[in-house]
Image (cartoon, rainbow, N blue to C red):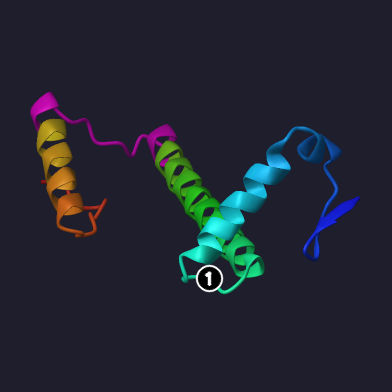
Amino acid sequence: MRSWKGWNWGDKIFWGSGLQLQMEQYLQSKVGTGFYSNASEVVRDAIRRMREESEKLAALRAAVQVGDDQLERGEGTPYTPEQLETITAKAFANSRHSKKVNPDVVP
């Protein structure tokens, strides 16, 4: 296992593939912006962001499962193409204005 400034990376393929220099340059460029004081902070931030994305994805999958379960129980509401266009347009408009969309409200 090799280390880079206190970080242990066990993936020998990573180190043998020439990515080490790219990773080091990227980390140093992030530190160079002044937003991070060292490479450890960059890595911690990256891991925090990956964790947040994983949590968002898990929540999305859970919501889809709820919808699938409701459809299987016959609780679905048929929409006309016009209703779907209205819903989509409203969702995009809300997104542009940073408004959250209430999934339980049908226009």
The residue to which callout 1 is attached is 36
Residue 81: image x %, image y %?
13, 25
Q: Residue at x 59, y 59 (%)?
A: 28
Q: Amino acid at mark 1?
A: Tyr
Toward the bottom, the furthest residue is 37
Q: Is residue 2 left or right of residue 71?
A: right
Toward the right, the furthest residue is 1
In front of the other: 65 or 31: 31
Residue 32: image x %, image y %?
51, 64
- Magenta region's main secondary structure? loop
Q: Is residue 3 above or below residue 23?
A: below
The answer to which quarter of the image holds residue 64 is top left
Secondary structure under tag 1 reads loop
Q: Is residue 101 above or below residue 44?
A: above
Q: Which class describes the residues within 10 Å of circle 1: few (<14), some (14-19), or many (20+)?
A: some
Residue 45: image x %, image y %?
56, 64
Q: How many numbered dots are placed on residues in this image?
A: 1
Q: Residue at x 16, y 32 (%)?
A: 84
In front of the other: 70 or 13: 13
Q: Is residue 95 above or below residue 31?
A: above
The answer to which quarter of the image holds residue 102 is bottom left
In front of the other: 68 or 16: 16
Q: Residue at x 53, y 70 (%)?
A: 36
Q: Is residue 64 above or below residue 48?
A: above
Magenta residue span: 70-82
Q: Residue at x 60, y 69 (%)?
A: 41
